Image (cartoon, rainbow, N blue to C red):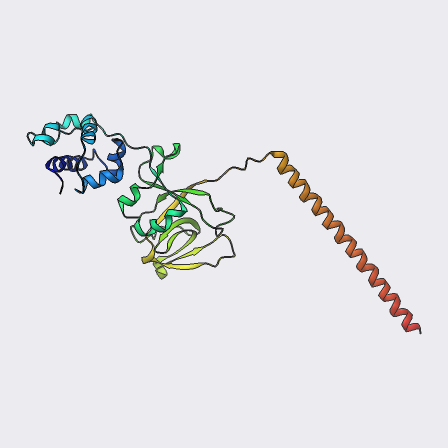
Amino acid sequence: MCNIVTKRFNECISLLKEKNVVKSARQLALSLEYIPQSMSAILSGERDVTIDLLRKAFENLPINAQYVFTGSGFPLLEDDMIKDTPVAEPCQNILYVPVAAQAGYSEQFFDPVFLSEMHSFSLPQFKDQKGDFRCFEINGDSMEPTLFSGEKVICSPVKREGGFTSLRNNYVYVVVTPHGVVVKRVINKIQSHGVLELASDNRFYEPYTLPADEVFEVWAIHLKITSFNASPSHFQNGFQENMKDMSQTIESQAEAIKGLNRTLEQLLKQHRASNMVR
């Protein structure tokens, strides 16, 4: 059971959430340079608040220190001070989901503690945009040549309202299912048949259907991150020249084979003619 100081601290944070000064436990932890998982444990009453965290909170938030330590006065400072004391928004708004974490993600995507343990980052074009984003790593060759294994896609969430009926046909999405995370081209048949048809750009893989009730999350892809081939240009040019020479050699051999076939046909005709004369 947490101590009385922790209870008062949590009460202050709850009031700041109501006033929209604090958005979430993760945002609060990042703004105070604290571990998100530990912050979640404090706010849930699993562990006590530390003196160092209290010091940072008093310096950055309109929390009444006297109330936290003694219980006297009001939990928060005056409302006009609250307006002038915004909490800095964390810039790391893209959560990275590597291949190794994707199986666990499909089982715990709703768990804030699990999500808080994953790495996050930001990019200039997403830094000032509101909302959470995901970066999923591509695994396998099913979406070649559109996406290759090892590439990464930056995505925003598709609203679940209406059962994902807003999904657009033939667009590529990241779909979170009970079986894992997949990247597929989607045919939306939820209204007509209650399923999504998931197709691969690599025609070796057959399309399949996914029941709507097995669709946990859907993420719309905005950006692809791919590795750069830093090999010298002369190496690439040499490879292209070799391919060109090989193509010319194959063409000349094909012509030689055609000429040989014509010669054989003439010899066969002459042989048949000589047999008929006899």
Residue drawn 35% across the image and 38% down it: 120
x then y, percent, for residue 78: 12, 27
Q: Nearer the viewer, residue 8 or 133?
A: 8
Q: Is residue 24 visible?
A: no
Work out whether 2 lies above or below 209: above
Instruction: Give me the residue at 38% from left, 45% from top.
Output: 220
* Relative vertical location of residue 219 with respect to residue 230 in this rendering, above or below: below
Side of 275 where 167 appears, left or right? left
Viewport quadrant of the N terminus: top left
Q: Is residue 101 visible?
A: yes
Q: Residue furthest right?
A: 278
Instruction: Please say if 53 is above or below 163.
Output: above
Instruction: From the viewer's perspective, tell me whether residue 31 is left or right of residue 77.
Output: right
Q: Residue furthest left?
A: 72
Q: Position of residue 37 (x, y in %)?
A: 26, 40
The quarter of the picture where the C terminus appears is bottom right
Residue 230, by quadrant, is top right
Judge by depth and name the residue closer to the eye, 120 or 224.
120
Name the side, left or right, on which 267 lies relative to 134. Answer: right
Where, by quadrant of the figure, is residue 133 drawn?
Answer: top left
Q: Residue 70 appears at what percent x and percent y?
A: 7, 30
